[in-house]
Image (spheres, grey):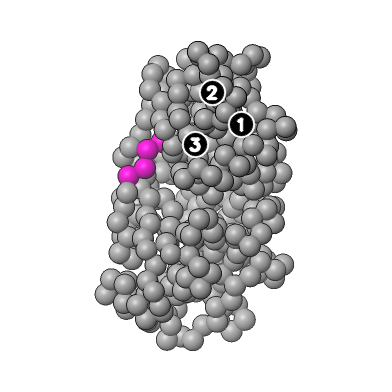
Amino acid sequence: MNAPFFLASSVVRLGGPDDRGAVARFLADHPIASAFHRPEWLDAVERSTGHRTHILISEQDGVIRAVLPLHEVHSPLFGRALVSTGFGVGGGVVGEGSPALFIAAQELAVRLNCPTIELRGGPLPEGEGWHVKTDSHAGFVTALAPDVEAQLLAIPRKQRAEVRRGLGYGMEVRTGSSAEDRAMHYAVYAESVRNLGTPVFPKRLFDAVLDGFGDDADILTVVSDGQPLASVLSLYHRGAVMPYWGGGTFAARTMRANDVMYYALMNHARVRGCDRFDFGRSKVDTGAYHFKRNWGFTPEPLAYATWTADGQAPRDVNPLSPQYKAKIALWQKLPLGLANRVGPLIAQGLA
């Protein structure tokens, strides 16, 4: 895409450094822009993983009408793709999705030797090469209750009993983003994903997000006898808290530390001024999907679009894919130290 794509009085072009301020203002003012569209997220991903950011801008009479932020993801194991946005569960076009904008994305993908485009939300394209999925993932968002007791009572009875059981252990809940908070979170998260059979993301990605988001991100950790049992890195965006990277150790299960963690985060977020709890996305009919339903959240279908160049196989980074079943079983058996050394090299391609 060496030249702008023109249509009547509109133009789609690739943004440059001089557009940064205008794009940031457009995103800040647009109601559907998610945390994963924010410049802080785009920069954090690029800085920590090397996946370059490209922003397509649709203008009419010199006024921005839409933007499409993309990360140029590259991996020797998982191939190359343009993803909106890397490591995010949201993304896609913000503004008026036009055929010219999607054509420009295809042209950019070809130019960058990326045979796949993945759009995670926003106005979705139609046409040759594009495939839209509306039944694979669901999002979970609900309003926060006005106080601590009301929040507990808002949890369905069976799940509420699990939270009460966990609270009975008198575990410590701490929040922050200090070096100690980050170390505890990474240790817990790395063990959690190893137990699930998934390579852990690079710690520098978490650090870059925390540094970039500042007060709009923090870590909440549940501790017992000085040992972290459950921990979550959360994002705060427009009145909603999203527990994004979280997990627990094997010991957390017995003490219901994960349940305490989410309940504590609800109360912490309300004190911070949030009015909504965004439990993120889950694949339909998975354990995580049903766990969130047990908390009283109603699943809302999400729509994603992918484009694959002619003659190319689509990128497959779905951990539920049959081709990964044996690899997941093997990964679960790896010593944690080895998994933590090798995992980030693999996982940074799973953007």
Q: Nearer the viewer, residue 331 or 61?
A: 61
Classify 237 as above or below 83: below
Which sits earlier in the primary sequence, circle 1 or circle 3?
1
Residues shaded magenta: 301-306
| Residue at left offset 57%, top offset 35% | 69
The residue singled out by tag 1 in the image is 55
Residue type at mark 2 is: Gln
Q: Position of residue 325 (x, y in %)?
A: 43, 44
Q: Compute the Cα span from label 1 to label 3.
A: 11 Å
In this view, which residue lies farthest toward the front?
61
Q: Is residue 206 left or right of residue 89?
A: right
Q: Position of residue 256 (x, y in %)?
A: 43, 75
In this view, which residue lies farthest toward the left?
157
Classify 87 as above or below 218: above
Q: Secondary structure at mark 2?
A: strand
The image's mark for residue 94 is 3
Based on the picture, tell me whether residue 90 belongs to the magenta stretch: no
Q: Nearer the viewer, residue 243 or 21?
A: 21
Q: Compute the Cα span from label 2 to label 3.
A: 15 Å
The residue singled out by tag 2 in the image is 60
